[in-house]
Image: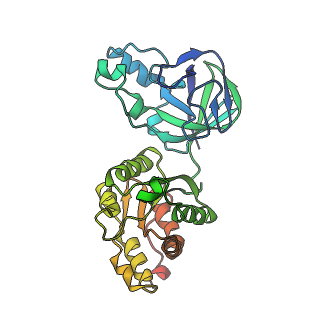
């Protein structure tokens, strides 16, 4: 579904990371890479950054007085509020086609603009996209917007909690197995991560994936036992908006058919915004079994979160 047009006001690049970008009069967008000659281009999900010209104008009217590219943005576009669009939105400029992959970003170090103004708009107003189709673009080109299809594949991320895995001392088998099962079921797995058994980095990644990347499903593996370093459930609950206990309870119930030790798993299942987060055990076998237990039933719940299905059950479903 189309939702209006914008106009490209400026195209900016830099050949070195960490410096302000400079304006150019023509850009070559390369699929699965970004803008030719830009230091932030590459085979990742933040290939092209976009910022609303209208947001920059309002910021300048408050005394910022910044030029195009000062925030590290590639495309400055008038007439579009990128922050209001969902991840998955597609942008068409000439023959080029982009797809939004992330909203905002974490600010690791306060820039000169922040030091002067007390804030910077890029971390919460900027968005990122990947290039799907090649094209040459210029300032003045029209950008057409198309919202994501309602029947698009669900997106997912898999996080493995392992001290040894994070240090490279152990090969992670549970994460790849979970990712493969999701992909076989039609999910688009956008990220797989290995983190140490510490709550802080897990909370950070859960919030980023749910808020910025807006993935439909996050599966975590490991950190659900009785060890003092098993803090996955606590970190998950800390970022939750709502509880969804039935999924974790069902995993434990079905796992008890395999071993009584399943009662010792403390995994939880919660909702943050429109993202479902489910803790799974740490072993590859347990991960595979847990996903098998719940995979068929997740579809309806994720559609409800996405807003494409009703919660009303049919009478025969309740019998």
Against 58, residue 180 (above or below) is: below
Front-lying residue, 308 or 65: 65
Q: Residue furthest front?
A: 169
Against 245, residue 229 (above or below) is: above
Q: Where is residue 310 in the image (x, y as percent from the top left)?
A: 46, 64
Residue 227: quarter of image = bottom left
Q: Position of residue 181 (x, y in %)?
A: 59, 66
**Quadrant for the C terminus in the image:** bottom left
| Color style of the picture | rainbow
Residue 245: quarter of image = bottom left
Q: Is residue 95 left or right of residue 109?
A: right
**Residue at the (39%, 34%) spot, across then down:** 124
Q: Where is residue 114 in the image (x, y as percent from the top left)?
A: 33, 23
Front-lying residue, 8 or 250: 250
**Residue at the (45%, 52%) spot, across then down:** 167
Residue 188: quarter of image = bottom right
Across the whole image, how many numbered discs are drawn on residues?
0
**Residue at the (52%, 36%) spot, across then down:** 128
**Residue at the (38%, 85%) spot, across then down:** 260
Against 279, residue 255 (above or below) is: below
Q: Where is residue 13 in the image (x, y as percent from the top left)?
A: 57, 21
Q: Is residue 58 left or right of residue 139?
A: left
Q: Is residue 312 left or right of residue 176?
A: left
Q: State whether residue 306 appears in this view.
A: no
Q: State whether residue 120 appears in this view.
A: yes
**Quadrant for the N terminus in the image:** top right
């Amino acid at each position: 579904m189309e939702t209006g047009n914008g106009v490209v006001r400026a195209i900016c690049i830099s050949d070195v990371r960490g410096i302000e970008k400079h304006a150019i009069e023509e850009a070559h967008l390369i699929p699965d890479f970004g803008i030719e000659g830009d230091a932030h281009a590459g085979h990742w999900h933040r290939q092209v950054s976009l910022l609303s010209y209208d947001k920059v104008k309002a910021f300048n009217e408050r005394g910022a007085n910044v030029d195009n590219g000062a925030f590290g943005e590639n495309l400055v576009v008038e007439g579009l509020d990128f922050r209001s669009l969902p991840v998955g939105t597609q942008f068409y400029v000439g023959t080029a086609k982009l797809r939004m992959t992330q909203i905002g970003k974490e600010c690791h170090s306060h820039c000169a603009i922040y030091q002067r103004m007390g804030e910077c708009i890029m971390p919460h107003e900027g968005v990122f996209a990947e290039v799907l189709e090649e094209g040459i673009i210029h300032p003045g080109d029209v950008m057409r917007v198309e919202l994501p299809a309602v029947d698009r594949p669900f997106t997912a991320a898999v996080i493995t909690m392992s001290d040894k895995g994070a240090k490279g001392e152990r090969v992670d088998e549970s994460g790849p197995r979970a990712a493969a099962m999701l992909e076989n079921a039609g999910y688009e797995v956008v990220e797989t991560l290995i983190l140490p058994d510490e709550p802080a980095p897990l909370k950070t990644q859960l919030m980023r994936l749910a808020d910025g990347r807006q993935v439909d499903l996050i599966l975590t593996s490991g950190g659900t036992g009785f060890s003092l370093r098993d803090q996955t459930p606590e970190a998950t609950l800390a970022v939750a908006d709502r509880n969804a206990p039935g999924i974790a309870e069902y995993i434990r119930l079905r796992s008890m058919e395999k071993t009584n030790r399943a009662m010792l798993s403390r995994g939880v299942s919660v909702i943050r915004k429109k993202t479902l987060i489910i803790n799974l055990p740490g072993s590859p076998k347990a991960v595979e079994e847990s996903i098998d237990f719940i995979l068929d039933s997740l579809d309806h719940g994720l559609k409800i979160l996405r807003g494409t299905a009703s919660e009303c059950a049919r009478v025969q479903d309740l019998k």
